Amino acid sequence: MPMSIDRLKSELIQFGQYAHQRSWVPATSGNFSQRVEPAEILVTASGVHKGYLTADDFLRVTLDGEPLEPRRPSAETELHLQLYRHYPAVKCVLHVHTMAATILSDFTEAEIRFSQLELLKAFDGIDTHEVSRSLPVIPNSQNMQTLAAAIEPYFGEPILPAYLIRGHGVYVWGSDYPSAFRHLEALDFLLSCTLARPYTLRA
Amino acid sequence: MPMSIDRLKSELIQFGQYAHQRSWVPATSGNFSQRVEPAEILVTASGVHKGYLTADDFLRVTLDGEPLEPRRPSAETELHLQLYRHYPAVKCVLHVHTMAATILSDFTEAEIRFSQLELLKAFDGIDTHEVSRSLPVIPNSQNMQTLAAAIEPYFGEPILPAYLIRGHGVYVWGSDYPSAFRHLEALDFLLSCTLARPYTLRA
Amino acid sequence: MPMSIDRLKSELIQFGQYAHQRSWVPATSGNFSQRVEPAEILVTASGVHKGYLTADDFLRVTLDGEPLEPRRPSAETELHLQLYRHYPAVKCVLHVHTMAATILSDFTEAEIRFSQLELLKAFDGIDTHEVSRSLPVIPNSQNMQTLAAAIEPYFGEPILPAYLIRGHGVYVWGSDYPSAFRHLEALDFLLSCTLARPYTLRA
Amino acid sequence: MPMSIDRLKSELIQFGQYAHQRSWVPATSGNFSQRVEPAEILVTASGVHKGYLTADDFLRVTLDGEPLEPRRPSAETELHLQLYRHYPAVKCVLHVHTMAATILSDFTEAEIRFSQLELLKAFDGIDTHEVSRSLPVIPNSQNMQTLAAAIEPYFGEPILPAYLIRGHGVYVWGSDYPSAFRHLEALDFLLSCTLARPYTLRA
């Protein structure tokens, strides 16, 4: 039984408040979405502060990118749609600007590798800390097609359900909102630990 | 249609609570203002804790610095007025003491440059991360004329809508309160990322 | 007079909210328990987010590990039971994932030593800062018997009422919930201070 | 007109909640007091968590250290009394365990000097950043007479209204609660900035 649109909005409104309290959506940054129908998503409107969302700050968009309501969708909606088209099981996509993601993306090459951390088990399909998983890091661009083309090759690899855009922020997804939120909490923990490691161990 | 004075006060009272929760206004520091009429502003009174403002903690002042109510305005009101006189479109000025601003101002020369960060798009008039913008840093003084004279030359340059006073804090402005708040959130994010960058990359 | 099960649950529900606010239980991590009867404990169910616990998210388990209710107990319940079996006076066990515990466990050998800090007096039985106490650090494993065997030898030594599992988190215990909470607050303070010490003093 | 005891308690209860939210009173640490009469103070009872104080968690004590109520006063009450006896104008003393105070006290000699920071103006009697003021750091001891004797010599010097005990925490005072709170907020800001300064500038 699918959840009502009101309930899907409510999850994202509360997530926005939490994200604002963590300083993950500064200055109207970030955008969130949920799949409503197989070929239709609900996404935050452009330009609103994600810490103070109301039910009016969302609109429905088809998988092809056609808005079904008058408001303008977030400029990065195309990156959400790419994930929904590629992964039929994905039902929720969250994009935020955490400090750790922004800083670490700026001085790593094409990926960050994690291993030996218990929190890796928070990601769907991982049941031991004895794995090694990659988080892709792609160059930033104002062209959504360029960003989409940069991330596309990673979809065939066993990456974490997330990627970073350099100097920009993190995208994370899941099979529903709780799953996407769990992945984001885990990822922020892993990235924050990486950033806070003492300097001598970092290199 | 201009906003009522009550509404303008309410925005600043709520901002003060948020700023206190972020530890941006320690020990009665900081001061906030909004333009009420083309030649009249509303500014916080001297000496009150900005995390616990009430409607009585404000007074109106003319652009020439004449108080229109009995309370004493913040000692730094002249710096607010300078911005309102120079930029007719500016409607709100926020001054706070963030840790990142205080620390970074203390070991940089005349400016801090930012580039390649998506959050730069949070500033009015910037639509790509591929820009480079300067944040002026001026020496501290207890003489408001000295401070005003130090910042004046930067007004002709394409600076961010903000400046730092060394060891003192940050001034930020915008076309209304949401705009000034967005600029401050973005600036704190950029400065905090700069401060938290690993040591090897900082120099 | 023993506390009612409702009261024991209520303490852990409120602790979970506090722990979530401190980011100690990211992504459904962590698990909590209290002793109900000499040979019976109450423990959090598997897979739930510890920041949003309800009275339905607990079940009773015997000291031998037999669930007395249909829900599945946390996968790490065996580590809780080991503590309750070894220490008859222990009434509460808390397991969380603090950043400081996770990071420091990753680059220390078999233990972390603390001395000369006033907060050591927060641990039962210590009444001066002029002591030196050890916090064991054991290797991580997905096999609970392996983890239990690794910590067992430390029980005969004058350790703090806590241990770390490498890259995983912290276990802490006490004679009731307030005692276990006090131990956890003190331990997080000691570990966070250790992590934040300037680099030159750390080695 | 002196404030009622209820009002004095209420100020300290709310301060405790704030201090707990900032993690300044971990694990029942810290103790607070206010002067009720010239020769009588109100102080927190021993052993209670300062984040959850109630009106029952205080007792009155004479300037000579005689409890006027059955509860046991905080073990460090003598340090509060020393300040009230030495400075007749002091009406409130706050002792907390901030991370910055604990860490910095551990690797500095007899004092920490501050200068050129605007927040110095938050201390009574300072009206410019162009001053240099000392914060004494004394060795820790479980003997209150030893601690009192170590701090006594500093009272004749132009110190900030505060001192650190090594590995232990900070004492701060003022002419009323708002004044002591303002001094503590300013001191924590100054110490936190010192701790967070980039390594190359710290030495």
Image (cartoon, coloured by chain):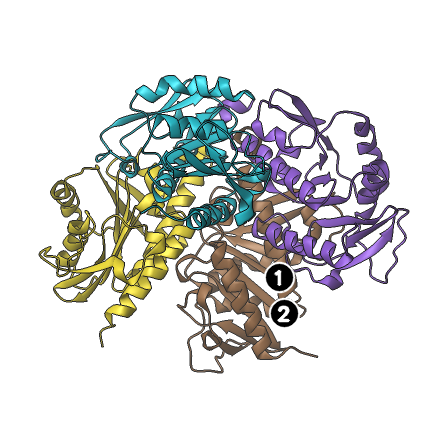
Chain colours: A purple, B brown, C cyan, D yellow
Upstream in sequence: badge 1 or badge 2: 2
Task: Tell me: residue D119, above or below residue C156.
Answer: below
Query: Is residue A132 at least partly visible in the picture?
Result: yes
Task: Tell me: residue B84, above or below residue B164.
Answer: below
Task: Tell me: residue C130, above or below residue C59.
Answer: above
Q: Is mark 2 on a helix, strand or loop?
A: loop
Viewer-nearest residue: B128 or C174: C174
The residue beneath circle 1 is: B180
Q: Where in the figure is residue B14, as x and y percent of width and height?
A: 54, 66
* Chain under callout 2: B
Left or right: where D177 falls relative to B124: left
C-alpha gap between disc 1 and disc 2: 9 Å
**Which residue is at 71% across, 39% downward?**
A172
**Which residue is at 63% across, 35% downward?**
A187
Q: Which amino acid does label 1 sit on?
A: Ala
* Chain under callout 1: B
Q: Where in the figure is residue A203, as x and y percent of width and height?
A: 56, 22
- Residues tagged by mark 1 and mark 2 found on one chain of the structure: yes
Q: What residue type is labelled 2?
A: Lys
When asked about the image quadrant of residue B92, the answer is bottom right
The residue beneath circle 2 is: B91
Label 1 neighbour load within 10 Å: few <14, some 14-19, many 20+: many
Q: Where in the figure is residue C136, as x and y percent of width and height?
A: 39, 23
Query: Is residue D127 at least partly visible in the picture?
Result: no
**Which residue is at 54% across, 32% downward?**
A193
Q: Where in the figure is residue C50, as x and y percent of width and height?
A: 54, 43
- Mark 1 and mark 2 residues within 8 Å of each other at the beta carbon: yes
